[in-house]
Image: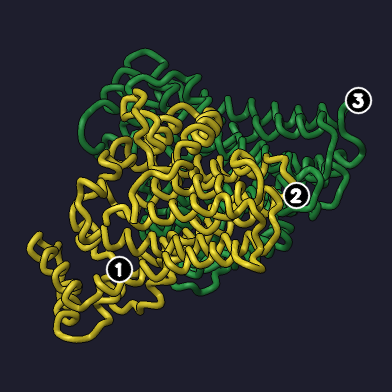
Chain colours: A yellow, B green
Amino acid sequence: MTTTLPGILTEVDEFVQPVIRAHLDRIDERTRRVAGYQLGYWDVEGNPTVRGGGKGLRPALALLSARAAGRDARDGLTGAAAVELVHNFSLLHDDVIDGDRERRHRPTAWAAFGIGPAILAGDALLGLAADLLSESPRGNAAWASRCLSAAIRRLIAGQAADIAFETRAEVTLDECLTMARDKTAALLSCSATLGAILCGAPEELTLGLALYGDRLGLAFQLTDDLLGIWGEPAVTGKPVLADLRERKKSVPVVRALTAGGPASEKLRDLYAAPGDLSDTDLATAAALIEETGARDWTTKEADRLLTEALAELDRLTGPGGAAGPELTDVHGELVAVAHFITGRDH
Amino acid sequence: MTTTLPGILTEVDEFVQPVIRAHLDRIDERTRRVAGYQLGYWDVEGNPTVRGGGKGLRPALALLSARAAGRDARDGLTGAAAVELVHNFSLLHDDVIDGDRERRHRPTAWAAFGIGPAILAGDALLGLAADLLSESPRGNAAWASRCLSAAIRRLIAGQAADIAFETRAEVTLDECLTMARDKTAALLSCSATLGAILCGAPEELTLGLALYGDRLGLAFQLTDDLLGIWGEPAVTGKPVLADLRERKKSVPVVRALTAGGPASEKLRDLYAAPGDLSDTDLATAAALIEETGARDWTTKEADRLLTEALAELDRLTGPGGAAGPELTDVHGELVAVAHFITGRDH
């Protein structure tokens, strides 16, 4: 696996960020300040930062999907800007909901500006995302709008399930995987198709890209779940063992809780104990999860999903595949993004 | 003034609520439960309630505006459902932001279900509102979308200003009135035009209705501000003196703070004092506001704005007015809604 930055990410900086910045001007000054902080444009005081936001993987996928449809990456620009806005809307609200104080090596927006301003900034970004597509003159913009709306609803469903699981004793692995798919794969899958949809690509191509995005998205979430337990804070930008501290029922945790056997039982007791978990408890919990084989299983599952995502791309470009020569060109970049997304800490 | 329920409100129950309920089915079950509670469809346990939601004034205005354009009220249905969803989205988030635990004589959604589920339910309703208009086959749906988006951005701006004012020592009356207009009048004005816009009404008519809605909306907010200090909890459904307890800089408060004189000074000291305000402090604050003449001024200002709103309707129906005979028919109902909105506790 490679951790080289795929070239498309520079196109996100060059083309997508200016579109988002221009649209940000529609928002009132107070809310814009919070939104721009979240997007990494400036610091708490409003001073410009050197590219402090996310990596722009979702808009990168949207641009590539336009290129996969045989068009210029910029033909997917509206979709790319919209998915980046939706992603940041969800981060703003999720950090409030989860009480997370740190993201990308900085205080989260609510920790820096307060809960109210962070909620409102999320609302504003969600509104802007919808505006971008509804104002697009492209013939397929209405369909793109529907796809994005459906992804947003799944994102909300996933986050709602995530919250509900925290206080529920029994969560099946299937329920947990559905939650992870809704929370993460839905928007990634939408991103990987939105540019193609805006370009009027044939349905087989957009469906293939949607499958690629779905598998990749779940692989991404599993990788993120692993990093939430065993990731280096210096790399993840989040406190160590944060997910376990919040008693998150992430995929490795639920796999471990439902594995059976002594380690699984001990983990269950630890998660059910009242009061805060101590640092020793957290380290024990991580060791128990590993002991059940859940770390190994989740790693292999992420690898398997990545392989499936790449196989989907191959199917599209192979004999009888839906893609023309355009997808062959862009194939390598979609592979690079897939490796990048799932290989951050490998 | 009358407090008789305008007839249009029964049409909201009959036509608009079923559209909202049908669209609610798109949301995941957990989030739908919170959203339906907010909308007054069921109680905390999910049992159907007897019409526990708001009165539906915004959707009523949207239906009437379709009728004002010479069409059936139901031609404004999509707009009516959208503004009711946006209104409830904002209530869900505002109650979290303000920490309000009671609304409409029930626990607020976050108090009943938790902060996370309430934020997500708001997000879902905002998404549904955008969907309703973007999926509408009507020719002017795109314009209606833009009007609603602009109103949502002003709503966010108003709420952001409201939060900022709480911790700011000096707020001018102008800033405060702009905040009130953004927070309340923008959506009301949008509601009063959305049905007409969807019906392709001439611009003079929609502009006239927008002005009517703007004046009415600000009158509504001023009335609400008065009730937030002197309203009976049994009528308002909110705790007594709630606005003063949160040190809200509502219009009567800012009018009093900027009035000058001994009562104004004393109020300023009280608002600037550290720690929670006692019940005695709150009663003193209310008395001081009254002493500055701010209660009287706000009441008269609300009356003046109501008169302006009604004059706008008269202008539309008068000689050379933009309205055809259709508006003459619906004129009485728009007047009744205006009286109802501003006369709740008179």
Query: Residue B192 falls in which quadrant of the image?
Result: top right
Give the residue at x 85% y 42%: B69
Label 1, label 3: how far apart the Cα atoms are: 76 Å
Locate residue B248, reporting x and y percent.
38, 34
Give the residue at x 72% y 40%: A137
Q: Chain of mark 1?
A: A
Label 2, label 3: how far apart the Cα atoms are: 25 Å
Residue B182 appears in the picture as rendered: no
Locate residue B104, reporting x and y percent.
49, 55
Q: Chain of mark 3?
A: B
Locate residue B255, reporting x and y percent.
45, 22
| Contact (Cβ within 8 Å) of mark 1 with mark 3 | no
Question: Quick one: SS at disc 1?
Answer: helix
Give the residue at x 60% y 47%: A67
**Residue wearing tag 3:** B319
Locate residue A109, reporting x and y percent.
34, 40
Q: Same chain for marks 2 and 3?
A: yes
**Residue wearing tag 1:** A299
Q: Quarter of the image for the N terminus of chain A: give it.
A: bottom left
Q: Residues within 10 Å of mark 3 (few under 14, many from 20)?
A: few
